[in-house]
Every structure is written in structure tokens, then in C-alpha cells.
Image: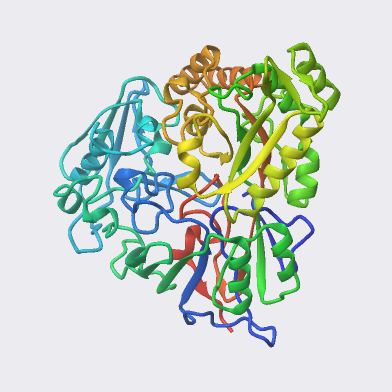
Amino acid sequence: MTARTVRGMATATLAAALITGLAACSNPGGGAAAGPGGADSAVVGIATEPESLSPLLGYGKDGNSKIFDGLLAHDADMKLKPALAQSLPEVSADGLTYTYKLRQGVKFSDGAPFSAEDVVFTYRTILDAKTNNASKTELDALAGVEARGGDTVVFTLKYPYAPFAERTVLPIAPEHIAGGQDVNSGDFTTHPVGTGPYVLTAWSKGEKLSFKANPGYWGGEPAVKKFTMAVIKDDDVRATRLRSGELDGAILPPNLAKGFAGDKARTTYEAKTFDYRNVTLPTHHPVTGDPAVRRALDIAVDRKAMVEGLLDGAGKAAYGPVPTDSPWFTAGTERAHDLDGAKKILDEAGWKAGEDGIRAKDGVRASFPLWYTSGDKIRQDHALAFASDAKKAGIEVKTEAGTWEVIEPRMKTEAVLAGGGSPADPDFDQYQLLTSSLGGDGFNNMARYDNPVVDAALVDGRRSGDPAARKAAYDTVQRELVKDPGYVFLTHIDHLYVVNDKWDGPATQVEPHDHGLGSGPWWNVESWKPKQK
């Protein structure tokens, strides 16, 4: 595992905030408390909640959904392991057929048996044009899925797609319930039934999600009997509620996490991630649509200063969606901070500085807004640092805070402090982020980036089964982002969690940019056990 466990006091490399997180409370005497929900419960704070709990609409698509299981799952080292399948799939020599034998005796939490027909129903429904699943392009390679008896499922692909098995961590929905409803608005979207270790007992939108252990779970009933996720969007409020003892957990940005650094009743977990923060540069804006402005901003930013100043060193400079320590990273695509070079690019492109130092060209002032989500300290800090660096080059960036409801209608022409990242496979994040075919499709390709060379390389990368050919394709993508940036990538963020020391079992995986409920030390909460006193 690349995640590192640090006991006792948090180190100087306190990690930045992920969207969800877990920490623990302690009693005034310094010993571990039972927690706000009792000795067999865990209460954690999350910053956002899903719009739906239906896997047919995208919930839990990367695994660890708690309510559901996929055919496969990830272990602590992000290696695939069987879940609803008995074993890893049998793959045909041409890479076009994946055959799964299913685990026997599995039941949904309502007592109905799980079968191959549920798998077929799930995948076919996601691919149905009427289903509002923004991630269905992730299954582009899938030509068909069929059941062979009650215990075998066969997937047929249009082309060899190297990471297809990774796509089968997708949760399986029960046809006998979800099949009789409107897939987009039916009761199943908020009252799900699955085969997973937990059962949803209540969901008060904007407040909390409550779960109880599934006594019939095929993997054994979890020792954590009650699991609650409190929805707390503001970092400061989350820290306050953690300190007051209302929570067993919360993830915090470094400046707030430092306030808990001396607690000996807690364990600090630092996880390496693919999670990045970037600035979208919409091509439909008169300033950010200019390639010269984009190239100038890409080298005007001081990424290393952001890592040290904003993240306390808990992260690394980002030059694209792939972290520099990944085997998929393309050496030589690092960009040094070069303010003079940025100014030269703008001068040569005709952006001339005015009396106030802000540039203009053909009557257009080099000014644009940059939105970040309210209450997100990490995004706010990155937005302000980016604006400060841009101003030194003569570009005015006006930072604005708002909810996603406010931001989303503006994304076509206004910049956003965004994020992303997936450790499972380079196709998973890069295709949705960069392909022109998804420009303006919700949160896919928010910059409406359009580069034919990148489009072709992304297709090559996802359709080839040859690791060397795939590496060459993603090398091409990363080199093109140097020449033609549609985003300014700022940092890759490590994640810090602090967990009450009453449990054995908490651990971390290499983590994505996760807006759901699956990352953090509770990715395996179903296997936690109370510590023996």
C-alpha cells in the first residue's frame, strides 16, 4: 500500500481535504470515547452527498458503496478481488469476452436471491438511452451482456478494452425492485436495496445518511452495527462538531487539522491519491479561449509554492491528471514556474499591459471570474493563489464562491476550481476530462477542450490491449497538454484522516478524487473489529 499510517500526533505533512473524511473524538481525560453513537457505531462527517443512491444512475461506480456489491472489488492495494463473482473473470484470447461465475447463496437485503439476471439488468439499464447516467461512456466498449443459467454472466466487448474488469466493481441492482420503476425518479433512487454489508435506514437530505449492519451479508455481519454520515459542507463547522464530540470523524484542511495534532487517542492516516485540483479554462470565453493566455497561465502558476504553502507539503505539483510518481506519468512534461516566460507569451500574442497592470487585446480586458465551491477551504486557497499568480502576469482573476447549483450554469464560459483523478486506470479520468465529444456534458470536459490529437490518443489508449501502446497514447496526451492546455493543473493532494483508536482494521487505499461515500479509512468499515481492552 502507498498509504502511510502515522500514530499519535499528526506530522508536518498534514494532508489536504478530500470531499469526505473520517476522524474520531476523545473524552476530556484524553482516552478514547465510545463515540456519539455508542461503542458499536461510527459517526463521520462528509462535505457533500450523492444526488441518488442508485447504481443505475452512477452511485458507487468505483466500488466501496456499502449498500451494494460489484462482481469484483478492490483490496487495500487496489488489486481486484472477487465479490459477487466467485473468482476473477475468464478472458478470451482476443480480449473480447469476459466470463464471470457468480457466488452462490447471496441474497439482497430484502431476502430475495441474487442471480445473473440482476447483473444483466444492471448493465443493460445503465446503457439504455433513457437512463440519466452521466458515466455511461465508461462502458463504451461493452457490446452486450447475457446470463447463462443463474450463475454465469458473459460480457462481450466491441474492442479489446484493457481495464474492462475494473468496470465490474460497479454495484449490482435488484431487477425485482428497480426493474418495476422509473429508473431516473423511482423510489429505488432514495430507498435502495442491495447485497452489501449495510442497509440504508434513513436519508435526511442535507443532514445525514444512516445505515445499519446487514445481518444477512454474505461476508458476515459487520461489527460496526450503526454507521452514520453527517452532511457538513463547511470545513470549519466540521472541525467544530468534531471538537465538540458530535462526530467520530471529520477530514480537515491542514490549518484546521493542526488543532487536533496532540490527541493520543486517535490515529492519523495519510493516503496517497490521484486527486488533483485544476482550473478550467473555457474555450468559449474571450480571454481563456485564447491559447496564448492558457499557455501563459500554465507557467505563471507557482505549483511548488502551493504544495508547501497550501498543503503543508502533503501533496505534489500537478502537470496533468497523472501524478508524477505514477508509472503512467510522462517524464519531461513538468512545467517550471516561469513568470517572465508567461509575460513574453502574452506580449507576443498582443496582450498589452494597461495603466493598472492588467492586459488587454483588441478592446478585451484580460479578466475572468473563477468559481470555487462555498465552504471548501482547499479550493478557496487554490483559487486565491492562482489569482495572485495570474495578476503578476497581468491577468485579472476574480474569485467567486457559490454552490454547484450556482456554478454549473456558468461553466460554459466561466472558469471553475475543479478536481478529479482516478487511480484505477488512465482511461477512467482522462477520457471524460478531455475528449471533445463530451465537451459541456455536465461535469465532463468542463473546459470544452477540443484537440484532435488528444481525441485520437484517448481512443487509442482505451481500445488497445498492449500496455506499451497504451503508454505511448497517454504520453501523447500529456505532451499535448503542455502545448495546448485546456486546464491549469495545480496540485495533487494527499488525504489525511484521523480515526478514533477504538477499532482494529481502519486502513487506506490509493484514493481517487472522491465525492461519494467510499474513500477514507472506512472503505473497509465492514471488517473493523473493536479493540480488545
Tell me, yes or no, if residue 179 can be seen here: yes
Placement of 499 over or under 150, stated as above or below: below
Choose top left, top right, bottom left or bottom right for residue 235. Answer: bottom right
Quarter of the rendering containing residue 263: bottom right
Q: Is residue 124 left or right of residue 200?
A: left
Which residue: 74% across, 42% down?
385
| Left or right position of 451 against 58 | right
Look at the image and tell me whether residue 274 can be seen.
Answer: no
Q: Residue furthest bottom?
A: 29
Residue 226 x/y as whole percent: 41, 73
Q: Quadrant where the C terminus lies?
A: bottom right
User: Which residue is rendered at x = 25% and y = 57% of the image?
Assistant: 106
Residue 313, placed above or below residue 347: below
Q: Position of residue 273 (x, y in %)?
A: 61, 45
Between 61 and 361, the residue placed more toward the observer is 361
x and y percentages locating residue 503 in the rendered image: 55, 73
